[in-house]
Each structure stands twice: as structure tokens, then as C-alpha cells.
Image (cartoon, helix red, strand yellow):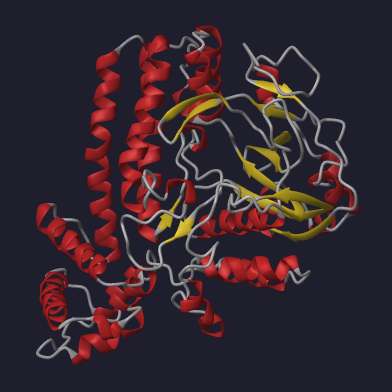
Amino acid sequence: MSLESLQFDNRLTEQLPADKIDENYCRSVEHAAFSYVDPTPTQSPVMIAYSTEVAALLDLEETDINSSLFTDMMTGNQILSQMTPYSLCYGGHQFGQWAGQLGDGRAINLGEISTHHHDRQALQLKGAGKTPYSRHADGLAVLRSSVREFLCSESMFHLGIPTTRALSLCLTGETVLRDKIYDGNAKHELGAITCRVSPSFLRFGSFQLPASRNDDILLKQLIEFSINNDFEHLKPQNGVFTESTYLAWFEEISERTCDLIVHWMRVGFVHGVMNTDNMSIIGETIDYGPYGWIDDFDLDWTPNTSDRDEGRYAFGRQAHISQWNIMQLANAIYPIIKQAAPLQTIINDYLINYQQKWGEMMAQKLGLIKFQGNTDLSLFQSLESLLSEVETDMTLFYRALANVSNTLNLDTHSEWLAIFTDCYYEIESLSVEYKEKFRQWLTLYIDRINKEGLTHQQRAESMNQVNPKYVLRNYIAVQAIEAAEQGDYSEIIKLQNILKSPYQEQPEYEAYAKKRPDWARHKFGCSMLSCSS
């Protein structure tokens, strides 16, 4: 399929009400799911990276991707005849406070493509200029944040985690003024645009905003649109929607969200800004802003400078916050369902389901065949307590744990310490008391795995399929960004290739699996990031 023959069916703009005002200026948009808006043309765009897998998802060939038309499309300079660019209208809770109308302030959807093998996919340009939802912002994005979005989207996909995808990364040829650490020292940075791809960009906030305005007509339209297009298996065969249909939809959103958070916890990913406008209705990771990867295991760590004091979105609080967000969605859709009890049941069950799924996930990380409830839960929780007590690299630890044999000699500390030495940031800080506690934990662990009947090789292979060796560590992303800002994009391309096989050894890239170096401990972008990241 060539670029010119892409089949845009634009279901959202055809099935939902549009903003009645055509002009592109900041305003309150009422009784509408979206506003038509064209991207702002760029001066001299250059594509610096793309995903061959996402191109294939859209039925595009290599020749299409390398054409000038593609670069022009991905930077807003060329709108094909079938495209109907638009930005979504939504609201949201930000850091627990209702923020009212938010919307796509710097994202513009080009349209929705009907593919041969992967149903529909929407193309969205992030950083493509002002929209009616930009408020006082410029609607643009910088290379720094665009590299992070591009690399992490694809990294998460290859980790097996639901996510929006990233098709392309382009420079605009212009600069953008940004105060990246909010210290009053703004400077001009290279402008960039990422094209992200998803079956749906609807968020929890898409439903919250009309509910906050008592616009039950639009709210009902949005719910039924979502069911018809993103949850087609829930569509009533007779076409008549009932409260049971809506409840089944809400329950599945809750289930998908729970699964997503368990995945984040499995690999040590911290979203950093789990506002309700950043929660996908189809359970994907969306909006890669001040995210971060756990280096040393710390349940209280957040990468977001705006969340430094409260820690609302810290690593260990993601499950509770996701339940809180689910509750806000329930509040929003109540006017349509009109039944509090079944909604409350789903909300109450959320953390129960999470605990079960988390236990099953942890059993897999430890190489156990089956999660056995409270007995295993005690084993898992005592391990996390130990990992929190001293600076221990989470990713390296679980890969090293796979090297523990079923017959490891625990009479002294020397043998097990040799396995885990590289996991500790300050191995000299391990006290005699800590070493003894860890030896006791390993004794329980080895006893537990021996009851499973798996050989060491079988267990190691199983563990290494869920415990990644390569993740997009913050300091590695910073190095790629700094090189790109100097015109060297080779690290971006190299990281793309490495992160396609995160569970494989890849000996030639061993340096990319090392723990955080000392220079990165407090460097901006490696330890903390702002919402402009």
C-alpha cells in the first residue's frame, strides 16, 4: 500500500459531534468530542528515526517511509485528501484536583487508517502546533521529550506491555523556547514531532469532561462509541445498549488498567504523571512525559519534579492511584448507568484483583510455576523489604536471581554474594546483619523452588522471559538525547535495536545493561524530570 492509497475511515469524526467553531484559538469547547484543526507547517523537516514494525502495522513499505512525502506528512506539511485532522476534547484530574477542560494541547490526529491485518489505527502528531486546547502553551515539542517518547513507546511494546506506538521522529528545523527545570532559565531547544499510533486515544478524561458539564447526551455518545469501536465484543447484537452493557465495558476497562499496572511493576516502570487525562480507555500506556525506570529498588521513588514532595505517583503507589482513577471514571459514567452498587463492587474488587495478579506476576519473576497465596506473598514482601533496605538495582537483581542454582551452598555468604555483587550500588554498605537476613531469605527461596520440580535451567529460562535485561534506563536516554542535540542520531538507532530484544543477552551490548553510574545519580533527566520532559 502506498501513502497516497492509505484508507482513512475517520470513524471518530464521523460518529461523534464536532466543535461548531472552525477557528483555531484557545476557548472552552462545549458539546463536542473534538475540534478540527490543521497542524502548523514546519520550515525544514528531517526524519531522523522510524519504526519498521509500526510501518508494517500500517501496511507501509520501506520506500514509502523514506519518501519526502512521508516526512512532510509526519511534520504536518502535507495533508492527504482523506485526512481530517482533529484534536480531542477532554478534561481530567491533575494531581488529585479537577482541572476542567484540558484536551490535546499539542497533539493533532491526522485521521484513522483502516489496515489489512490490524483493524484501525489512528495517527497522531505530538508537537504539531497550537490547538483550541493549548491554553497559553505553544503546542510544540522539543527533541529531548520527543526522543524519550519515541524510544520508550517502542521499548514498552517489545517488553510486552500495552502501549501507544511510535512511527516516526522528525526534526522541524525550528527551535522552541523551554524552561526544562522551571528555574526561570528558559532556552531555545531543537523542535521535533513524534507520530504516535493507537487504535484509540480516548482517555478517562474524555468521559469526565461531559459528565462535569452535565452533558449526558455527549457522555452517552462517547460511551457507546467506545463500545462499538474499541470493545466490539461487548456490542449488543440487537443494537440496544443497556446498563449491563455499560457495566461490562467499565469492568473491562478496570481489568485492562489493572493488568497494565502489574506490567509496569514487573519491569520497574514509573509513569510519573498518572492524571486521569493520561489514562487510556483501552488500557495502553500513554503520554510519556516525566516517566522513569527504577534503578535502585525504591517504592517511594518518583521521577517527576512536580511530585517530589507528595510522591503521589511514586512507583509503589501506582496500583492505588489507578484504582482512584477508576473511581473517577465510575463517578463520570454514573449518570448513564444510574446504579451505584455494581460500580462500587468493581471499584472495591480492583485492589483484590491487583493483589492476585501482582502475586502471579511475582511468582513468574521468581521462577515459580504457580502463585500459592499468602505463603508466597510473605516471601515476595520480605524480598522487597530487603531490596529497599540497601541500594539494589532491580533489573540486574532479577536477572542475577535466575543464576541461583537449586543447590546453592549457603553455609557462607561468599557464594551468593558473588552472584549478586553487580546488583549493589555500594556493596561495602552491606552489614553482617543484612547479609544474614538475605541468606535466610535465599534459604526459603531455594526450598520453595525445589518444591516446584523444575531444573535450574528450566527455571532460569522462565525467569529470563519476564525479567528484562535491557530497559530504557534514564541515563542511557540522556546520553542518546545529548548526542542527538549535537546532530548524532546513532545512539537512538542503536537503542531501538537493543530494546527490540530486551530479554535476550546480546553480549555485544553488555554496556547498556549496567547499573546507573555515579555521575547520573543527581543529573537532571537521570534522577528527576519535569513535565516538559
Percent x, y of residue 224: 52, 17
Q: Is residue 316 left or right of residue 524?
A: left
Percent x, y of residue 419: 29, 85
Q: In which quarter of the image is residue 468?
A: bottom left
Q: Nearer the viewer, residue 191 or 38?
A: 191
Judge whether 511 appears above or below 356 on screen.
below
Q: In this view, does 460 lie to the left or right of 132?
A: left
Q: Which residue lies furthest to the front in this view?
A: 184
Q: Is residue 120 left or right of residue 413?
A: right
Q: Which of 190 and 198 is in front in this view?
A: 190
Judge whether 230 appears above or below 520 on screen.
above
Q: Residue at x 45, y 12 (%)?
A: 241
Q: Residue at x 35, y 50 (%)?
A: 262
Residue 158 visible in image: yes
Q: Nearer the viewer, residue 464 or 187?
A: 187
Q: Which residue is drawn at 33% across and 69% down?
A: 462
Residue 9 visible in image: no
Q: Which of 352 and 301 is in front in this view?
A: 301
Q: Quadrant of residue 252?
A: top left
Q: In this view, does 16 lie to the left or right of 246?
A: right
Judge whether 170 appears above or below 353 on screen.
below
Percent x, y of residue 94: 47, 33
- All told, the count of numbered labels is 0
Percent x, y of residue 193: 74, 49
